[in-house]
Amino acid sequence: MESAKKHYANGQLQAEIARRVSYRTESQASEQAAQLHVYLKLELEAVLSRMGFTCLIVDNPLSGKPPLLFAERHEGDDLLTVLTYGHGDVVRGYDDQWSDGLNPWKLNVQGDKWYGRGTADNKGQHSINLAALETVIKVRNGRLGYNVKCLFETGEEIGSPGLKRYCELNTRQLKSDVFIASDGPRLSASQPTIFLGSRGSVLFELSINLRSGGLHSGNWGGLMRNPATILANALASMVDGKGRILIPDLLPPPISPLIKTTLGKLSISDALMGREIDKHWGEPGMSSAEKLLGWNSLEVLAFTSGNPANPVNAIPPNAKAFCQLRFVVDTRWEELKAILRKHLDAHGFESVDVKVQRGTAATRLNPDNVWVRWAEQSMKSVLDREIAILPNLGGTLPNDVFANVLGLPTLWIPHSYPGCAQHAANEHMLASIADEGMQIMTSLFWDLGELTPEQMHQS
Ligand SMILES: [Zn+2]
């Protein structure tokens, strides 16, 4: 723990993150494609090789998509194996939107905040984990007492293309006992957090195309169908004016007693969220934690008809809405198209077309799993604080790949917080969390070496 604290206090961790932030690994910008490989090679392969890993930078199984890195450090066949993960890509810099004096590609320290693109998502987080692992290797004189596998991708911000395929094709190579990684936010800056999965997300489009051009509202109004009116009513039949989902098939089964108890320990308050929560929004009778982490939400993301910038006196010919369902495990999201079709037809909205775009499954490890209790214990031993345990994150991560394709118990230990401005200008990491993160991960990577497979295989 002394070495871990020193790695933070002497500026080494900050220097590593600063160096990594300087690579423009914007996976959404095709002109930066070469940087993704450079980052894997010069940053991740370099540090992993130094730590005794065998590294393999591999082409994405989907042609033209960004590369991945697989690394392995093997100490013995009878030992536990941990799989970890991170992503080297970041969203676009939006360079001109940052506050005065800030540059997304140059780490800038202001008080407790370390500004820079990727500090929170995900370079800062995987830098902490790699530094903690290296600390344990050094202090234990080169021996961890378990095996480690690492998987890094460089396309997370464009939907992790090929990640699932890679794991499906390499289940033997990736076989492990547990998954531990870091991404996303803590419940709040001051609460060390473990989340055990994520809500899923599926995007869909509703549209009505009635005719090729607008019709004068004086000559035709009252005679001809208005697609905007129909679509607004179709949406209103799906989700009411207080955010409650009205299609039973789009809801999960009732929240189980165990999940209710787990969520009951989390207080999601105005203070914690940094803004006043709309108390009467969402499923009636549920707590904020249940609404956000134990239930589904249906959002209208964008809705257009006619030309809002220059309205004319005409019945518009078409209307379109982009929607998203965030959902927890056991939601029948893969049947979304059929569910929506049936609902719309039953309510007289046959003219509304449904197009389901991409979706990611929801996951959730049982909060009673032996690995969860182990991690909670290990974290408590260094911080002596309550650990927030979230059955799943409210947001979405490619965790179904690890939980479902590889069948692993998944523990996510985030080193960021809700105000980190991830995906926006002024993204930052909190130095205080980086400091704690070093200690938490060092504790976990240390304690892992004292477990035997027999102890954990009851999971
Ligand atoms: Zn992200």
Image: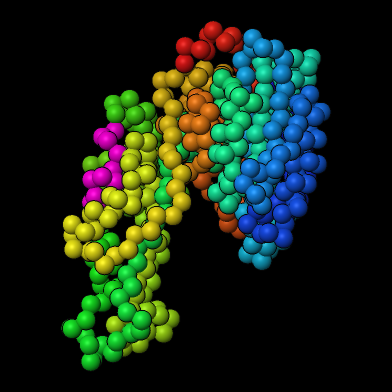
Q: Give the image location of residue 50, x and y in percent.
A: 81, 28
Q: Please indicate, yes or no, whether residue 440 appears anywhere in the rendered image.
A: no
Q: Give the image location of residue 397, x and y in percent.
A: 51, 41
Q: Residue furthest bottom?
A: 219
In-front residue for pair 370/113: 370
Q: Is residue 384 left or right of residue 17?
A: left
In-front residue for pair 292/36: 36
Q: Which residue is drawn at 41% across and 65% down?
A: 302
Quarter of the image for residue 253 reads top left
Residue 245 on the magenta span:
yes
The image shows a total of numbered marks equal to: 0
Q: Please indicate, yes or no, whether residue 46 appears anywhere in the rendered image.
A: yes
Above or below — where is 439 with respect to 87? above
What's the magenta bit mostly, secondary-structure-wise?
Answer: loop
Q: Give the image location of residue 275, x and y in percent.
A: 42, 52
Above or below — where is 390 with respect to 209? above
Residue 98 on the magenta span:
no
Q: Which colour scheme is used?
A: rainbow
Q: Residue at x 63, y 38 (%)?
A: 86
Q: Quadrant of the N terminus?
A: top right
Quarter of the image for residue 364 reads top left
Magenta extent: 244-255
Q: Give the image location of residue 401, x and y in percent.
A: 52, 35
Q: Residue at x 43, y 81 (%)?
A: 309
Q: Is residue 48 left or right of residue 445?
A: right
Q: Residue at x 64, y 12 (%)?
A: 79
